[in-house]
Image (tube, rainbow, N blue to C red):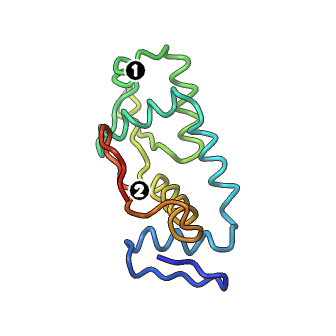
């Protein structure tokens, strides 16, 4: 995918979802929104929460399961979950007396599309082949 100086986006080599997000970014109108998302993800605890919720996708986890998995005090966990929910990074639904949280993959997809558009298409700072990375393996272009 290429973004030209005229704002046109060549989307022949990427998924339609990523291409759509890249098109949105050309004008930069969403930059402040993505800054808020990065800010919400900017703590170790919140990144750990997102990782555990992604590992439980699509079902998500109830608060007690998250707390047990991550060993985060309940009041701290509630604060972090609320911040993630407020920014749309997680969804929450009530199940009786429990709250079940799940990663909002739509928001995460948009965030990844923004990064992809900036680093792999417009500036080509990173090869698109390097984007897919697996823990424990070296990155090759």
Q: Which residue is mark 1?
A: 70
Name the quadrant containing residue 103: top left
Kindly identify the residue that appears in the image at 39 percent across and 36 percent down: 51
Question: Local crowd at mark 1 within 10 Å, few (<14), some, or many (≥20)?
Answer: some
Q: Position of residue 49 (x, y in %)?
A: 44, 31
Q: Compare residues 2 and 48 and report the one nearer the observer.
A: 2
- Compared with residue 123, is residue 45 higher up or lower down, i.e. above or below? above
Label ID, residue 126: none
Q: Which residue is mark 2?
A: 131
Q: Position of residue 4 (x, y in %)?
A: 60, 82
Instruction: Compute the Cα span from label 1 to label 2.
Output: 27 Å
Q: Compare residues 23 and 103 and report the one nearer the observer.
A: 23
- In-image side of 9 versus 15 (left or right): right
Under tag 2, what secondary structure? helix
Q: Compare residues 127 and 111 and report the one nearer the observer.
A: 127
- Compared with residue 105, is residue 103 higher up or lower down, i.e. above or below? above
- Compared with residue 6, is residue 42 higher up or lower down, i.e. above or below? above
Q: Position of residue 110 (x, y in %)?
A: 50, 59
């Amino acid at each position: 995918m290429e973004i030209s100086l005229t704002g046109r986006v060549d989307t022949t080599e990427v998924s339609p979802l990523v291409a759509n997000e890249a098109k949105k970014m050309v004008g930069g109108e969403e930059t402040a929104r993505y800054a808020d998302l990065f800010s919400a993800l900017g703590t170790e605890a919140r990144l750990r929460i997102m990782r555990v919720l992604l590992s439980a996708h699509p079902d998500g986890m109830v608060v007690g399961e998250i707390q047990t998995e991550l060993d985060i005090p309940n009041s701290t966990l509630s604060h972090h979950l609320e911040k993630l929910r407020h920014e749309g990074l997680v969804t929450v639904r009530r199940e009786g007396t429990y709250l079940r949280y799940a990663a909002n993959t739509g928001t995460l997809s948009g965030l990844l599309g923004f990064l992809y558009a900036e680093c792999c298409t417009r500036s080509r700072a990173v090869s698109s082949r390097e984007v897919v990375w697996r823990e424990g393996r070296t990155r090759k272009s």
